[in-house]
Image (cartoon, rainbow, N blue to C red):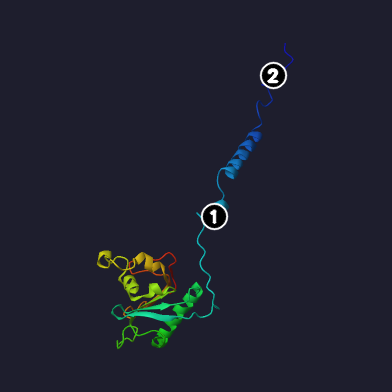
Amino acid sequence: MSDQPDPYEEGKRAGVHPLIVVFAVLLGLWLFVALIVPSSKNKQATGTEGPAMPMIEDPEAAPVIFKVEATVPDMNAVSLVVPAQATESQVVGLLKRLKKERLAGSLSDLIPATTPGHKLGDHAIADIYVTSDPKYAKSEVIRTLTRGAHAPGGLYPDAVPFEVAMEEIKGHYRIDLHNTGAPDTGSVGFADESGVHSRHYRKIF
């Protein structure tokens, strides 16, 4: 008769204790999550995850100087040039200032009339473009922007491409007093009426 104990002796548990098995499974799952599944921190570090942070406007930003570069009467459009170092907050401040002057009836002190003699005022309809590069404030470029992204390019073979011109626009202010629900729209960057917009486009009002 053998002296070795019978592993299946009545009253004794055979094999590994169940708690050890459960612990081993949990440890394995933890290692899998820690080593295989990338953390959210790593995803954000690669720039593929996480929402873009909104720009924080600086209410104390100094007013930006500007000059009128071109007027396009047949398209009710005006272009303004600001310094190259003008910040986004300063452009926002300029757009809000223009709107304030429009509401006060004194926009003509800053911007040439786009609808002179109109019953609704000198700026009943206006597209005001803000850029820091005078090359993109010329009448031909403003015409391209005002026509929009879907104008047939073959009709204007010498024009600056729309997609190039719109990226050079720092700010855009459109006035349409016939639209009583939203007569003023302003944005950083530019978007045409079809919704095509520049990379840095952001609606202000």
Residue 96 at x, y percent in the picture: 45, 79
Q: Residue furthest right?
A: 3
The residue labelled by disc 2 is 6
Instruction: Tell me if I can see residue 134 in this picture.
Output: yes
**Looking at the image, how many numbered discs can be counted on the residues?**
2
How much space separates mark 1 and mark 2, taking CA atoms? 58 Å
Q: Are marks 1 and 2 in contact (CB under 8 Å)?
A: no
Depth order, front residue of 15/113: 113
Q: Which mark is residue 44?
A: 1
Depth order, front residue of 132/40: 132
Q: Residue at x 65, y 35 (%)?
A: 19
Residue 23 at x, y percent in the picture: 64, 37
Depth order, front residue of 180/142: 142
Amino acid type at circle 2 is Asp
How dense is the environment of label 1, judged by Cα within 10 Å: few (below 14), some, or many (20 and up)? few
Residue 75 at x, y percent in the picture: 30, 77
Q: Secondary structure at mark 1?
A: helix
Depth order, front residue of 174/15: 174
Q: Is residue 202 above or below residue 117?
A: above
How dense is the environment of label 2, judged by Cα within 10 Å: few (below 14), some, or many (20 and up)? few
Amino acid type at circle 1 is Gln
Q: Quadrant of residue 28?
A: top right
Q: Which mark is residue 4?
A: none
Residue 154 is left or right of residue 184, and the answer is left
Q: Is residue 154 above or below residue 90?
A: above
